[in-house]
Amino acid sequence: MTGSSGPKNRRPATDRKFSRILSAAAKVFSKTGFERASIRMVAAKARVSLAGIYYHVQSKEELLFCIQFNAFRSIVTDLEEKLGASEVVDPTGRLEILVRNHLDYFLSHLDELRVCSRELETLTGAFFKKVEEVRREYFKVALDLTKGILDGNGQSHGSVDPRTATLCLFGMLNWVYTWYDPAKDTPADLAKRLLELYLGGVRREVKGRAKRRAQSTLANYGYADDSGEYYITIDADKCTGCKQCIDACPVSVLEMIVDDYDDELPAVTDEHRRKLKYSCVPCKPECGRVELPCVECCEPNAITHSW
Ligand code: SF4
Ligand code: SF4
């Protein structure tokens, strides 16, 4: 695989010719699809001989590899340089640099973007692995910035999963080739608008958690009567929304609800709120409290009983 001797190590003159070949290959793969494209078509597009192409690569798959590897490597290298030179330290500002860098590259390389998006799973073996390594490296930078936005120390991200949020961000960025119109959108405007959309969702979560922290995170369900207090308490700060307590309850005392902060949490159903003492008898008969399924299954200790 010439990928390891790599485009980066070529002499400048050879690089220029190889760049022309890669650019032609990206155009052909983008228009025709990788499956239907041939090396002969690439040679015609690049105006080089077949031998001229085989001087650089051994197969059509290697051409695809070089397009993808070059694209991701260029983006990561540019990004590292920009982040390294920037005085911006807050993760939102740094994510803006990432989004702008991504769009700057791909909006001037739309064929490469199409090929990277559509043919991501086409590569096999060592080719796939090498591209995957650089993609992972890139993804980690974006993931860490998203974590930084969600939570200063990256420990608690509420109902927003940073990995899912980052995947959505890339989904949004990589889908641009289907609707991008240079007459209507500049890369700078687009970067701002897409980032605002992304941050809109992320900030909503951050605001929701800040608001929740300012108030109580405990939700009590139950009642008190002459014989005592019968409350089940859910700590929203600890609850991960795993639903295990719902499955563990033998008499469906609990259900999942969406609270005022858009978090999915368990709650006692209306039917059982006023008769909890009796509803929970199958788990804790009056002769004495035993281990409670809903409490036992809850790893973060988010659920407690008052009696
Ligand atoms: S088992 Fe615990 S963490 Fe999971 S939903 Fe129930 S209360 Fe929340
Ligand atoms: S104690 Fe038993 S019946 Fe009561 S909520 Fe927990 S699992 Fe359900």
Image (tube, helix red, strand yellow):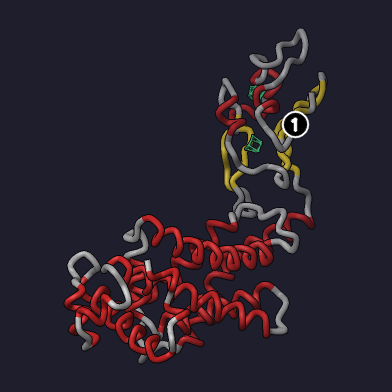
Q: Where, by quadrant of the figure, is residue 174 drawn?
A: bottom left
Query: What is the number of callouts on the image?
Result: 1
Furthest toward the top, the residue is: 287
Q: Residue at x 61, y 52 (%)?
A: 159
Looking at the rendered image, the quarter that the N terminus falls into is bottom left
Q: Quadrant of residue 177?
A: bottom left
Q: Nearer the viewer, residue 144 or 230?
A: 144
Determine whether 49 is above or below 245 in the image.
Answer: below
Classify residue 210 as left or right of residue 139: right
74 horizontally vs 52: left or right: right
Q: Nearer the viewer, residue 247 or 41?
A: 41
| Residue 272 appears left or right of 284 | left
Which residue is at a point 73% across and 55% down the rendered structure image?
212
- State left or right for residue 51 relative to residue 169: left
Q: Nearer the viewer, residue 122 or 288?
A: 122
Q: Which residue is mark 1?
A: 304
Task: Please provide percent x and percent y for residue 170.
Answer: 48, 67
Q: Amino acid at mark 1?
A: Thr
Ligand 2 image position (quadrant): top right
